């Protein structure tokens, strides 16, 4: 990239820091956006978080995360839907245009049934999201998470789901970590045109060990980042690009050092 | 399943045992087939292995593994092709109708280039395989292995690759662990009709940790095994069904106890 104007620092990249610490550090380092997580908002308090982000002059690119729709009982599914309404409210209060949906695993062996629960759940809250000006962004997760985090596993599946729901405030968000391996990747990015509500970058380390924590800093893994970013650009996404990395070594870095590395790698590799 | 007539015990399910131990135990336990690995053949000696399997009356359903075609230099790619010729010879010597191909990772960030090297490699050895009566079975590996084991990640991709090569002795082998998450799974199994050369079963444990070792015994995970087996049956596969499990706890079991559990779970879940 030529400049930092699209860079967003997802706060899970600095898991040990609080939201105030991340907001202040991003402001200090000239990073215009942050991606915010709900458990971090809860620590800080929603109104306080909104105020401190405003004061720091840092915009929120997205809130993570809604979703987790499938459950064994209808009462539990309704509770999940209610929780998504709270997440939409939090995103709106922070001025975030996007709520990222991690759709959830199946409660049993019926993955197709769980996919229907995801669709039902998104349909149930789409109008609430629109009323608050928040777009629900379906994030396909790597198939390694199909059993415990998301039955939505490919960009194709996420885009087709958004197409079926066909709502002004339902879209998709590709993350390079989750989709880089896809044999139909570039055709699918093209097909996602008009459905994009974000773009997440990091890298895939080799060899993989524990799949949740295998993310690396851009340039440390095997993903063709520049090519993917350019394809996502061509598909019409010109908004924030979020750096989101779950990695113990990254988490152990001093915050300003981490932000400097993030900026340098973003400019070099994305 | 109603009986054990299609059951094959892939010897990596008993990683601590030698080939003679596995062959004798399968004969004792009434398991008609074994899947054999090359490093185990090397330990025993090829001719000796062929003799002891014949004497035990246990048939070899497949040899694992050929493949690993992509490499940075043409000399190294040629060496990989030569090694595949040796693997074909070993399979033929053991009377195995199938050599399983784990296609290999990219030597750099160019996954599409690596996929072309896989296609070139299979084309280079297909006639050799045919001459020896061995079918090359492309095994798509779970996308979690795209960076270090196989750039071929979906059943669709493996089948399309086999279709492009269009050779009498090039086919695909689905393993439930690698493909269970696929949103197009049942359509893809149907499309694989005429291209199947095997079927591998095990289970996906939740939550996943180290992805290589996350396989479980049938029934211990979240895969709809019976439904997938019936779909593979309808797609025309009526040959051996291999149980292949990489799992430290399974590996620690006494061999006969493991085979009894394998038979029971196969009859109950597959």
Image: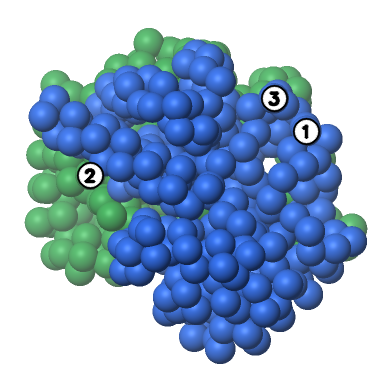
Chain colours: A blue, B green
Residue A236: which numbered mark, if any? 1
Q: Does A221 sit left or right of A83 as displayed?
A: right
Q: Which residue is mark 3?
A: A194
Graded by Cα atoms within 10 Å as few (under 14), some (14 to 19) or many (20 or more), the crowding at tag 3 reads few
Could you say which is closer to the camera, residue A160 or residue A167? A167
Q: Are marks 1 and 2 on the same chain?
A: no
Residue B129: which numbered mark, if any? none
Instruction: Provide the chain ID for the residue under circle 2.
Output: B
Q: Is residue A64 visible?
A: yes
Mark 3–mark 1 Cα distance, whole angstroms, equals 7 Å
Between disc 3 and disc 1, whose residue precedes?
3
Mark 1–mark 2 Cα distance, whole angstroms, equals 40 Å
Q: Secondary structure at mark 3?
A: loop
Tell me which residue sits at (39%, 48%) in the image: A90
Q: Secondary structure at mark 1?
A: loop
What percent of the width, then of the height, locates residue B60? 40, 41
What percent of the width, then of the height, locates residue B180? 39, 34
Is there a contact, CB below 8 Å, between mark 3 and mark 1? yes
Is there a contact, CB below 8 Å, between mark 3 and mark 2? no
Q: Are marks 3 and 1 on the same chain?
A: yes
Mark 3–mark 2 Cα distance, whole angstroms, equals 38 Å
Residue B221: which numbered mark, if any? 2
Tell me which residue sits at (65%, 33%) in the image: A196
Could you say which is closer to the camera, residue B194 or residue A215? A215
What percent of the width, then of the height, locates residue A16? 42, 79
Foreground: disc 1 or disc 2: 1
């Amino acid at each position: 990239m030529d400049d930092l104007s699209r860079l967003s620092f997802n706060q899970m990249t600095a898991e040990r820091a609080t939201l105030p610490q991340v907001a202040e550090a991003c402001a200090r380092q000239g990073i215009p956006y942050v991606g915010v997580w709900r458990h971090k908002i809860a620590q800080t308090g929603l109104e306080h978080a909104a105020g401190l982000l405003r004061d720091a002059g840092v915009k929120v690119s997205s809130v993570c995360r809604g979703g987790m729709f499938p459950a064994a009982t209808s009462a539990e599914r309704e509770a999940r839907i209610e929780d998504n309404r709270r997440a939409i409210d939090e995103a709106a209060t922070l001025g975030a245009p996007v709520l990222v949906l991690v759709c959830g695993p199946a409660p049993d062996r019926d993955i197709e049934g769980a996919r229907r629960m995801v669709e039902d759940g998104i349909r149930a809250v789409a109008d609430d999201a629109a009323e608050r000006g928040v777009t629900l962004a379906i994030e396909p997760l790597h198939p390694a998470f199909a059993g415990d985090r998301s039955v939505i596993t490919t960009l194709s599946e996420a885009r087709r789901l958004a197409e079926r729901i066909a709502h002004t405030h339902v879209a998709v968000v590709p993350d390079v970590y989750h989709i880089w391996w896809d044999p139909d990747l570039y055709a699918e990015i093209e097909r996602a045109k008009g459905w994009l509500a974000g773009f997440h970058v990091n890298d895939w380390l080799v060899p993989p060990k524990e799949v949740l924590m295998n993310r690396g800093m851009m340039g440390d893994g095997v993903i063709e980042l520049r090519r993917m970013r350019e394809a996502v650009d061509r598909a019409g996404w010109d908004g924030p690009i979020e750096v989101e990395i779950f990695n113990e070594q990254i988490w152990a870095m001093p915050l300003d050092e981490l932000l400097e590395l993030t900026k340098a790698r973003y400019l070099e590799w994305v």
